[in-house]
Amino acid sequence: MVGASVRVKGLTKRYGDVVAVECVSLSVERGAFVTLLGPSGSGKTTTLMMLAGFVVPTAGEIHIDDRLVTLDPPYKRDLGMVFQNYALFPHMTAFDNVAFPLRMRKVPRREIAERVERGLELVRLPGLGHRFPKQLSGGQQQRVALARTLVFNPRVLLMDEPLGALDKKLRQQMQLEIRHLHEQLGITVIYVTHDQEEALVMSDEIVVMRNGRIEQIGTPRAVYDEPRNNFVADFIGETNVLDGTIIKAEHSRYRVRTSAQVEVWCAGEGGLDPGRPVTMIIRPERARFVQSAESDNCLPARVEEVVFVGELIRYLLRLPSGEAIVLKCPNDSRTPDHAAGDRVLVRIDPEDIRVLPPLHSQPKEDT
Ligand SMILES: Nc1ncnc2c1ncn2[C@@H]1O[C@H](COP(=O)(O)OP(=O)(O)OP(=O)(O)O)[C@@H](O)[C@H]1O
Ligand SMILES: [Mg+2]
């Protein structure tokens, strides 16, 4: 079994006045694990349904390897699909659920038995074939649904929020299992989730969607560390957003005056001029407490709230400008023991402050 590449160009779906997906272009390499990530209604399912052949695009093209499949029916596309609600037949055993589509296609009995056993083994359910869905946990049911798809040796596996119905612990375990299965089989996976953590853990590449459009495509690291705009920064992980004005621009770094009237150095792509209002994006784990203003890039603040989260401590601070800033510090002996009301100094490395044009002036990007 080996994965196919998937190329999508200008893919669009309109329902009357509703634009569900607008001009999505995307290239997925053979054997890659790519995740469509976005809030509810951003067009993830519609995109997947067009890839699968269940929804006819209004415009655009889909290639699987070098074959144009835009108007091909689902069964000609060599794809498997797994949904959130496992859609198992309740009156059939796990074995029969997996065997059902093979029987429909008149696969010989002997071969069915072999393929079903192998499928159940792949999803780590050997020996449970005789159980009915109600005798299986949510995670086990989802594995049966996965096995039912894998018995066809699809070259591309489409998954739409397959773990959405599971509790957090089981979800995390299944995330790793699906990853391992992907590595083991070498198939291409296009995965849909609105859970940013899930996308970061599982994917080679993340496609961030909003309002039917692609906001950014990149590795988990790239979309986390170098978000292209506030939406991506805010959607992927927790983010502090502060206002400021550029007072000096050097190549790829800026001196910015914050609303609290303190100046800091920031990183950012070129092209922003002095005098320009900007937003600064700071990840909560990249800021830290310092004793005195020993160096540049410190902000004075007052501690408003301290929350113990186990392996880390989360501080809500208030800047003199009234803006809030969150800090996440490891729960170790180096983190000072601050309490609500304390006056503190926070230092952020220039490369950990990303400067972007303010949200309302960010152009809509064509992809
Ligand atoms: N059959 C349809 N008729 C009209 N509008 C539709 C139809 N299907 C989807 N839409 C609209 O298209 C947009 C995208 O829907 P889609 O289901 O692709 O979003 P999603 O990203 O999968 O969201 P969720 O995370 O909630 O599953 C939504 O605004 C939705 O209301
Ligand atoms: Mg959906």
Image (cartoon, rainbow, N blue to C red):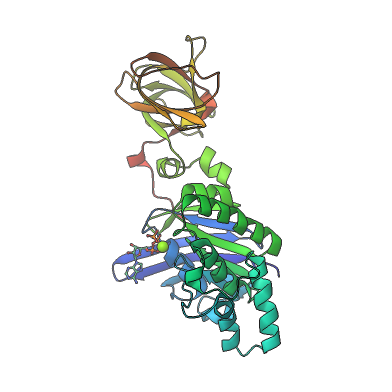
Name the image quarter holding the N terminus: bottom right
> x, y (%) of residue 345?
43, 15
> x, y (%) of residue 52?
51, 73
Residue 118 occupies quadrant: bottom right
> x, y (%) of residue 192?
49, 59
At 59% from the left and 87% from the top, the residue drawn is: 103
Residue 85 in view: yes
Towards the viewer: 215 or 357: 215
Q: Quadrant of ligand 2?
A: bottom left
Left or right of 290? Residue 316 is left
- 236 in relation to 294, above or below: below
At 47% from the left and 48% from the top, the residue drawn is: 196
> x, y (%) of residue 160?
48, 64
Residue 217 in view: no
Towards the viewer: 311 or 255: 311
- 149 in relation to 111, above or below: above
Left or right of 165? Residue 190 is right
Residue 68 occupies quadrant: bottom right
Towards the viewer: 254 or 307: 307
Towards the viewer: 272 or 352: 352
At 44% from the left and 44% from the top, the residue drawn is: 232
Left or right of 243? Residue 196 is right
Q: How many marks?
A: 0
